[in-house]
Structure formats: structure tokens, C-alpha cells
Image (cartoon, grey):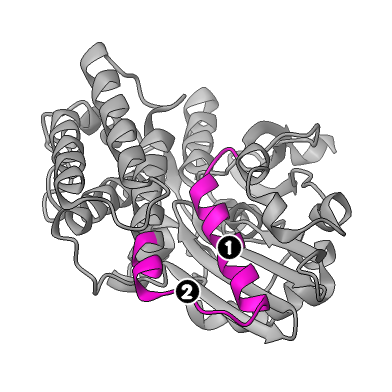
């Protein structure tokens, strides 16, 4: 996002010898949407959303539209809902791929061209019309499959080719944290939505800046989706495993787009009417579950507008990243610090982050 708000998370890792004694997180600041848009017609916000939310802009648009419809007591047609799911999935694939390569993994000329092909083809699937012509959809998906194959991403069962450019990157994430704590895992699900959206609309920024679900601060995103499905232990939740999960989900999403299955549903889009003029929506985007909540007056003007992004869960002061790091034993020197940076990056915040290390005895 922009508008002059501080778009960076500050992370300080406190060390006692080679053990992480504590982790302090100063969250990014977020725009006060109610104050910015109160009194404005809900429809007038649609052109503004892409400027507010440059990442996952499709997911934000779908969340806002769905929340407004719920507030108005309307239900979108089935064809509209299928189209929204498709464009969210296409954007999720693109964002997962971009998050792997931008500023993290090295790209040669061929790989860079493949990433561009995926993004361009996904954009064609995410057009404004509710029915992408079948021929255009097939051509777009074929381009995505070809580009992913060039990157070494195959099918869901063999998520990446062992001789691809991805293999060294995955291998490079292993073995740097000498030991990781056995942290309690908790994952955000659609079953949590009613409690979250009710509190989001009632409490506003006081809740969205530091959210919880009945005292829990669950993880959301790629790893949460995989771990819920496969019951994976927290000891297997290192940077390499998270990168593999990202690659596997990219392959899974491509398979769904190729088949056009209507039964794919990991809670991609859900909406909730919270009373007259009040509604909310949840969208499962690349980084996890995104929430929008709105209250409208009788003329469909904004009274309240709140949002809660996945980053606020994963980078909570007592959230999953902190639980994954506290108590870990690091390799000496730069290698250990690089391991921490890789793990932080694998949680994929929607903004930049700064990472510093200090000795606990020097506080």
C-alpha cells in the first residue's frame, strides 16, 4: 500500500549466546480506511482499491464487493461467484510465484521470461468479465503450464524438477537452523470467520492491529493450508519445507485452472451479513485469509470500512513467526542470521521488513 504510511515491519531477534531468547516485532502502520472514506459512496471506492492495495489487489476488490453485497442484503449470482473464485486463484498463483522470485531467488533470462509469461497469462484470466471465453481460458492456462514447466514446476505429486533452478534454492534453506523449537501450531480456518468479522467491525483498528481468535493467534497462508490438509508437525515447518509447500500449491492451482473444476473450494470467497447495512467477506489469497468489513447508511455511503490482512496474524507480536523462532539454536555467525532471514521471508509479509540481531545481555 502507499499513501505515506509506514510500510515496513521491524523485527529484532534477541540472542543469548546462540539461542534466540526473544523476538520483538513492531508492525507496519495501516491506513485508517473509515476516516479516509466515511461518507463516500461505496461504489466510488472501487477505482481507489488498486492504489491502496498494490499486492493482491484482485482479492481486495473481491472482498470489498462481497462485503458490500452482504451489507446490502444481496447475493451474487453463481456465475459471478465462480468468476471471482477463478480470478482470486489466478492472482494467488501469480503472487506465490512473484513472492518466490522477487528479491529472493536468482533469475536467469529464461526464468525471468517464464515468470512474466505466467503473470501475463494470469492477468487474462482475471479480466473484468464474468465469463472468460473457453478458448481464451485454454490458451492462458496452456501458457501458464508451459512457463511453470520451464521453471521446473511440474504437477502436484512432483512439485519441482530436481535438476531445475529451484532445487539449489530449496537445498540452500536446509541445515542452517541447528534446532527449531517444537512450537504449538494453530491455523486460521473459515470456521473462525464469524467471530473475526464481528469483532473487526465492532472494534476496528484496535482489533485488526493485533487480532486473535479466542486468545489464539493462528497462522494463515500457504503453510497453514498445507499443514491443515496433511497434518504436518511444527518440526517440519522450516524455510525449505515452506518453499516446497509454495511450489506444490502453485502446481495445484495450475491444475485447478486447467481442469476448471467447480468443486475446488478452500473457502476462496465467503460473505457474511451482520445486520442491516453491515456486511463482511473473507477471501483466501496468496498470503492467507483476508477480511473486509463495511457498514453502509441507507444511501450506500460508507459509515465504517475495516480490513484485516494475513500479515497481521503471521507477524503478530505473539504470533506464528515468533513461536517458530523463540528457542531456536542458530549456527554461528552470518550463516545463522541468514537462516533467520530465510524463515522470516518464508512467511511472506505483504510489506518489507527490517531484521536486526542483538545480544540479550546488551539490552
Q: Secondary structure at mark 2?
A: loop
Residue visible at 20% across and 38% down? 144
Crowdedness of circle 2 by 10 Å Cα count: few (<14), some, many (20+)?
few
Q: From the viewer's perspective, tell me whether residue 229 is left or right of residue 224.
A: left
The label on residue 65 is 1
Magenta segment range?
54-83
- The quadrant in which residue 88 appears is bottom left
Whether label 2 touches label 1, CB < 8 Å: yes
The label on residue 83 is none
Relative to 264, is 172 above or below? above
Q: From the viewer's perspective, tell me whether residue 257 is left or right of residue 71.
A: left
- The residue most toward the front is 299
Residue 78 in the image, given as x and y percentages of width and height = 36, 75
Residue visible at 40% across and 34% down? 98
* Cα–Cα gap, marks 2 and 1: 10 Å
**For mark 2, what is the residue?**
76
Amino acid at each position: 500500500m502507499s499513501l505515506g504510511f509506514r510500510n515496513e515491519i521491524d523485527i529484532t531477534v534477541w540472542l543469548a549466546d546462540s539461542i534466540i531468547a526473544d523476538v520483538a516485532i513492531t508492525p507496519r502502520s495501516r491506513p485508517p480506511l473509515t476516516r479516509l472514506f466515511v461518507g463516500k459512496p461505496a461504489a466510488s471506492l472501487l477505482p481507489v482499491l488498486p492504489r491502496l492495495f498494490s499486492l493482491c489487489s484482485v482479492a481486495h476488490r473481491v472482498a470489498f464487493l462481497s462485503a458490500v453485497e452482504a451489507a446490502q442484503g444481496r447475493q451474487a449470482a453463481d456465475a459471478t461467484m465462480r468468476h471471482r473464485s477463478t480470478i482470486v486463484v489466478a492472482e494467488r498463483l501469480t503472487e506465490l510465484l512473484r513472492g518466490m522470485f522477487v528479491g529472493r531467488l536468482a533469475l536467469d533470462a529464461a526464468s525471468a521470461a517464464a515468470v512474466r509469461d505466467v503473470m501475463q497469462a494470469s492477468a487474462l484470466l482475471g479480466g473484468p468479465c464474468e465469463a472468460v471465453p473457453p478458448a481464451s481460458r485454454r490458451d492462458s492456462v496452456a501458457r501458464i503450464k508451459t512457463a511453470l514447466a520451464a521453471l521446473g514446476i511440474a504437477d502436484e505429486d512432483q512439485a519441482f524438477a530436481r535438476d531445475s533452478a529451484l532445487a539449489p534454492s530449496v537445498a540452500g534453506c536446509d541445515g542452517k537452523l541447528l534446532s527449531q523449537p517444537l512450537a504449538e501450531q494453530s491455523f486460521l480456518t473459515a470456521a473462525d470467520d464469524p467471530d473475526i468479522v464481528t469483532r473487526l467491525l465492532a472494534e476496528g483498528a484496535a482489533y485488526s492491529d493485533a487480532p486473535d481468535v479466542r486468545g489464539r493467534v493462528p497462522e494463515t497462508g500457504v503453510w497453514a493450508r498445507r499443514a491443515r490438509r496433511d497434518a504436518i508437525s511444527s518440526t517440519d515447518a522450516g524455510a525449505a519445507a515452506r518453499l516446497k509447500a509454495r511450489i506444490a500449491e502453485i502446481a495445484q492451482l495450475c491444475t485447478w485452472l486447467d481442469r476448471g473444476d467447480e468443486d475446488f473450494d478452500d473457502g476462496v470467497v465467503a460473505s457474511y451479513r451482520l445486520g442491516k447495512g453491515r456486511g463482511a467477506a473473507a477471501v483466501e489469497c496468496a498470503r492467507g485469509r483476508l477480511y473486509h468489513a463495511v457498514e453502509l447508511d441507507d444511501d450506500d455511503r460508507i459509515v465504517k470500512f475495516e480490513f484485516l490482512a494475513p500479515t497481521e496474524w503471521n507477524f503478530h507480536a505473539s504470533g506464528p513467526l515468533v513461536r517458530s523462532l523463540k528457542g531456536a539454536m542458530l549456527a554461528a555467525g552470518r550463516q545463522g542470521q541468514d537462516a533467520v532471514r530465510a524463515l522470516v521471508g518464508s512467511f511472506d509479509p505483504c510489506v518489507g521488513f527490517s531484521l536486526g540481531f542483538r545480544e540479550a545481555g546488551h539490552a
